[in-house]
Amino acid sequence: MSKEIKIIEEKEVNQKQRIAREILEALPDWFGIPEAREQYIKESPDQPFFAAYDSNKPIGFLCLKETGKETVELCVMGVLKDYHRKGIGRKLFEQAREKAKQAGYSFMQVKTVQMGRYEDYDATNHFYLSLGFKEFEVFPTLWDEWNPCQIYVMSL
C-alpha cells in the first residue's frame, strides 16, 4: 500500500461502472449473488460515487442513493480485501457523509445482514456502528430468511 491513498468523487459514467465491477467481483464473500451485484453496477453511474485509489489503482468505492427528501442511503460500498482495516472505508464514508450534508440531507441509512448471522457481515456491522450508525430496525424477510436485513441510521 502506498502512503498516498486518495479519495475522489468520480463523475465519469464508464469509470464508475468499471470500478464497481472490478471491486465487487473481487469480493464474492459479500457480493456473491450475481443478480444483486449486477444491480449495484447498473445503478452506480446515476449516483454520487466516491472512489479510493492507491496510486492509480482503484481499491474501493462507495455509492450514495437518495431514498427520500431528507434521507440518503449508503447504497453500496466495497474495499479490496488486502486494504481492509486500513482506514479506507472510513475515508470513503467521511467524504460521502460530507457530500450528503452539503446536499441538505438530514439522515443517512445503510442496510446489511443482521449481526450474528455471518462472521464477515458481523465485521461489517461493527464497522457501521464504529462510524456512528445506530440500529433502526430488522426486516427478517426483506431479502430472504437466511439474510435478515438490518437497517442502521444516523443523523447528519
Image (cartoon, grey):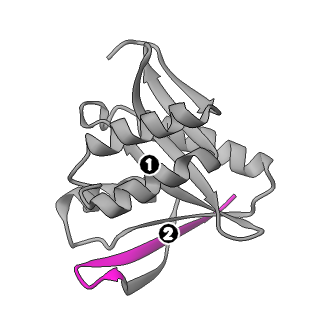
Are there few (<14), some (14-19), or many (20+) residues within 10 Å of tag 2?
A: many
Are there few (<14), some (14-19), or many (20+) residues within 10 Å of tag 1?
A: many
Q: Residue at x 41, y 82 (%)?
A: 138
In which quadrant will I find the C terminus? bottom right
Mark nearest the camera among 1 and 2 is: 1
Q: Quadrant of residue 125?
A: bottom left
Q: Is residue 152 magenta?
A: yes
Give percent across and percent down for residue 11: 65, 33
For residue 63, side relative to residue 70 (left or right) = left
Q: CA distance from mark 1 to mark 2?
A: 15 Å
For residue 51, side relative to residue 108 (left or right) = left
Q: Residue at x 51, y 58 (%)?
A: 75
Camera-side residue of 11 and 114: 11
Judging by the rendered image, the residue that carries numbered circle 2 is 152
Q: Quadrant of residue 12?
A: top right
Q: Is residue 7 magenta?
A: no
Say which amino acid is labelled 1. Met
- Say which element carries label 2: strand
In which quadrant will I find the N terminus? top left
Judging by the rendered image, the residue that carries numbered circle 1 is 77
Residue 102's place in the image compared with 149, above or below, is: above
Say which amino acid is labelled 2. Tyr
| Residue 44 in view of the camera | yes
Residue 119's place in the image compared with 22, above or below, is: below
Q: Which residues are magenta?
A: 143-156
Q: Residue at x 63, y 49 (%)?
A: 46
Give percent across and percent down for residue 93: 54, 44
The circle on residue 35 is none
Give percent across and percent down for residue 79: 36, 39
Mark sitting earlier along the chain (1/2): 1
For residue 49, side relative to residue 107 (left or right) = left
